[in-house]
Amino acid sequence: MMPRVAPRWPAWLLWRVACAQGVSAQQRTREAASRLPGLGGPRGAVGARPLVRRGSSWAPSRAPEVMLTRERYPVRRLPFSVVSEDDLAALERIVPGRVITDPQELEAPNVDWLRTVRGSSKVLLRPRTCQEVAHILRYCHERNLAVSPQGGNTGMVGGSTPVFDEIIVSTALMNQVISFHDVSGVLVCQAGCVLEELSRHVEARGFVMPLDLGAKGSCHIGGNVATNAGGLRFLRYGSLRGTVLGLEVVLADGTVLNGLTTLRKDNTGYDLKQLFIGSEGTLGVITAVSILCPPKPSAVSVAFLGCPGFAEVLQTFRTCRAMLGEILSAFEFMDAACMELVRHHLRLACPVQESPFYVLIETSGSAAGHDAEKLSGFLEQVLGSGLVTDGTLATDQRRIQTLWALRERITEALSRDGYVYKYDLSLPLDRLYDLVSDLRTRLGPRARHVVGYGHLGDGNLHLNVTAEAFSASLLGALEPYVYEWTARQRGSVSAEHGLGFKKKDVLGYSKPPAAVRLMRQLKALLDPKGILNPYKTLPART
Amino acid sequence: MMPRVAPRWPAWLLWRVACAQGVSAQQRTREAASRLPGLGGPRGAVGARPLVRRGSSWAPSRAPEVMLTRERYPVRRLPFSVVSEDDLAALERIVPGRVITDPQELEAPNVDWLRTVRGSSKVLLRPRTCQEVAHILRYCHERNLAVSPQGGNTGMVGGSTPVFDEIIVSTALMNQVISFHDVSGVLVCQAGCVLEELSRHVEARGFVMPLDLGAKGSCHIGGNVATNAGGLRFLRYGSLRGTVLGLEVVLADGTVLNGLTTLRKDNTGYDLKQLFIGSEGTLGVITAVSILCPPKPSAVSVAFLGCPGFAEVLQTFRTCRAMLGEILSAFEFMDAACMELVRHHLRLACPVQESPFYVLIETSGSAAGHDAEKLSGFLEQVLGSGLVTDGTLATDQRRIQTLWALRERITEALSRDGYVYKYDLSLPLDRLYDLVSDLRTRLGPRARHVVGYGHLGDGNLHLNVTAEAFSASLLGALEPYVYEWTARQRGSVSAEHGLGFKKKDVLGYSKPPAAVRLMRQLKALLDPKGILNPYKTLPART
């Protein structure tokens, strides 16, 4: 018999995570810290192996060098100019003392954090202002020099690292908050502000950032916008296409497009900022962002539940949306294989009875008592009806982080399991998990693990396959199979990660030829020489 | 002494609107009906004069003919072809029996509902499918014939009526719901579906449309999207840029861009649909829409409050947002002059003690009891602190509509007050009302009324000035003064109405030259011959 959840958080339930499952206080702290990769993660961790730091190419010292992109992939350098000594001198005049050419300093920004692609850029620039970026691009445009804009370098698809010798333009020094208005909640800041620092800034003023993601300790807001990042608050606060109010962008020829409005509504002409949201730095370089922050909820709760099957996960979602309504802020799921990975590689304990599926539900509201009543009613319903076989919940920050770590650290656990084939798909809810089961059968023992997890509330599946090492035959079994399967469901082959370098050639699985043609025309209009983040987003011409 | 609002809706408060202020049951029904212009409005109305029907050029039979746009405004016809007999025969083959050339039938679609602009189109087409629209545009593109796409013709800026002899392409027969998914809440429908009918469709299935506006009885969803309509639910559900998931669009040359995805997340390439949202039919004709509908709230309440000054209105908003949090779904304001207009012209009674300002607050939630508690706490706070001097509230549909009518019918009352100069501005909250006071002083007795109302929660002021008749000198006192004032506050000269024909030349007050230049480039890319809705959105070249 499973325990029934009574209203008003019974003590056994509140404390179950911390005590009953043997999670120590130290472990909680560690897990909480590692929720912020790039900050707590690698430094605070204690374990068999150092954690992977998302947001730089930090790696164990004995890690083998990453293969050059131009060697692993069939890609040819386009006829851009090569940086000369004269160019370096000219760039030095634009950003004095901030032209980096030291090969050691250039190692990290040439490699993505997943260590799957590597460029060979010889120059990195660190502008501080929009005007400096404009001067740089005007110069590069004239000289036909290719540019790779880079924020926190936390992307998943090789979009933020050079492919050949593109000049890296880093937003790292463009990290100033320009203004925050504590009535409207509108934040205006430079593109290089780190998401977590912005969160702290607005939370101190009673607001939250409308987006949150695992890489928040390293990722830059400009990169988030350029990727159209989704993440953990999408279900509640929606897409950046709605919450970003304005952008300052430098076009390929150095023209500054100043659209840093702080207005919620502005229907004067075409909404140009939308061109740059999600265009991965291929149409312009975002130098500042104006974004609407929602008021900080005064009460947050997290329930972690075990479900006997995926049908029950879906039914739990329906029940949850009906009963929790406006306070629902996240609905995430993970399968038993994910739980096994975080247990094995990260030593995280499962806080509930072992189940085929797990669900993490977060609520955020303005009245703790009301939220608790709603959540109790919901839990009673799903436990009573057998949709959920066991559950635990948390209302204080530390326990909430412990539960969130189980979901957020899956990526890290996967990276310790071997070579990872990663897919980020949007699929119709009722078919969302079928692909995972299907692939397990298809791949058999060739795969070490086939796991599925993700933002169920947004129809977003993260499908990952691990194996001992990279293998062309396993890749052949996965692709184009996964993309064709997705296309048959009219899904998206990139829900939130973008296309970058690694996924650009699969665009056609989700977009018709007329759309791809128009995309190419937009690229040609905005960047006629193609110097901005070349080899990314749009498929190579065959 | 003002009455204090006690928790849990005392009977006197609930009934105050209906009884204490002498509003009869018939009047309530009438007002409720007239909330749906184009349906109940003109038919059900009883009053001194017939109501203005928004959504067609319906007008009293003795209304003077509207002056031709080409005569009132300095605009010259561009060198498009003129429709010939051969053209009519060709179009008849594309949409057999649906080529309208009867001058009487063409009267209404040539005039906007405000009766301020009038074209002289000789042909209206009624396609039923995307393919028919594609054939029409392919033909017109080849023949260099200009086209004016038209939905419900409820726009405020002359965007949906022809200026000269453009062929009107009406979406009226493209009114089919294609699909609705009752788990995801995604609606897919043709562009000509009337918003109110869609509302009924999804409400019967437990969802609501993410937008609502006064013209819902007539406006088409395709027109809403083409205008990027804001409206009454913007505060809660955000912009169409976030809730529209996909569009089917026909480009100027007849190419069909099929982007009718139903996915919440899709980061494959550039988000082309954003080009067409808010572009007022100048870049393509929207033929179908996929839109995300939120679950229908089980409890809705409306509070109507009187405030002693605008500072108190702002402070009430701050308090409200803090105390009502996630259940706040609208925060509208109107000044005493607006109340006087609806009282005088529409015989609506003020439900609270007369005040300099009135606020309408709507809450929508999933638990009536919780919402009532939150709202009671808030009302106690604002009444106790003197921010609000009197208030009433409603929780049943009929009384809610009675209160909403006070706000929604201001436009109608204004149209009965004389010639109306209309401005739809986004301004910083703390300066929002200053312009209204400023103009009252500036215009003195030249204006009959200077009124301010609007979506305060979105920073959106509707500023209206009435006078006995149109006068060039009054216009000269208003413009460019209003636009310059707005530009100094970095506001928007069109918050939600768009630019259409009447506001296109003021784009430069809200957008810098580089942005206007890029807009022109986009227009040239997507519609090289300029046949789509010419003379709209972009300023005339000087």
Image (cartoon, coloured by chain):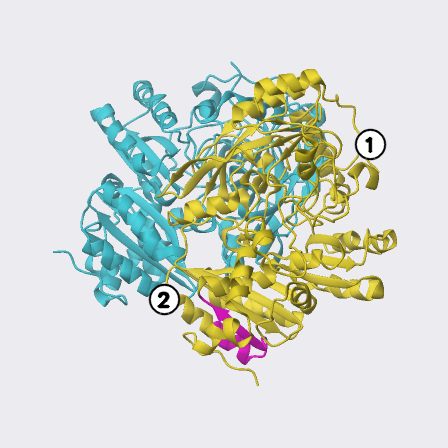
Chain colours: A cyan, B yellow
Q: Is residue A95 visible?
A: no
Using a 10 Å C-alpha cutoff, classify the residue at mark 1 as few (fewer than 14 neighbours), some (14 to 19) or many (20 or more): few
Q: Is residue A370 left or right of residue B255?
A: left
Q: Is residue B229 left or right of residue A494?
A: right
Q: Residue shown at 24%/24% (left/top)?
A: A442
Residue B502, how many percent across, how many down?
A: 74, 43
Q: Secondary structure at mark 1?
A: loop
Q: Work out whether residue A301 or residue B478 is closer to the camera in this orientation and state it.
A: B478
Q: If the image is split into quadrants, where does the N terminus of chain A sit?
A: bottom left
Against A364, residue B281 (above or below) is above
Which chain hosts label 1?
B
Which residue in the protein does label 2 denote? Answer: A370
Question: What residue occupies the far front of the structure in this picture?
Answer: B61
Residue A234, how many percent across, how many down?
A: 44, 47
Which residue in the protein does label 1 denote? Answer: B76
Q: Work out whether residue B145 or residue A298 is closer to the camera in this orientation and state it.
A: B145
**Residue A372 in which image quadrant:** bottom left
Residue A72, how many percent across, how many down?
A: 43, 20
Q: Residue shown at 28%/67% (left/top)?
A: A8
Against B274, residue A122 (above or below) is above
Using a 10 Å C-alpha cutoff, classify the residue at mark 2 as few (fewer than 14 neighbours), some (14 to 19) or many (20 or more): many
Circle 1: residue type = Arg
Which chain hosts label 2?
A
Stretch of the chain drawn in magenta: B378-395
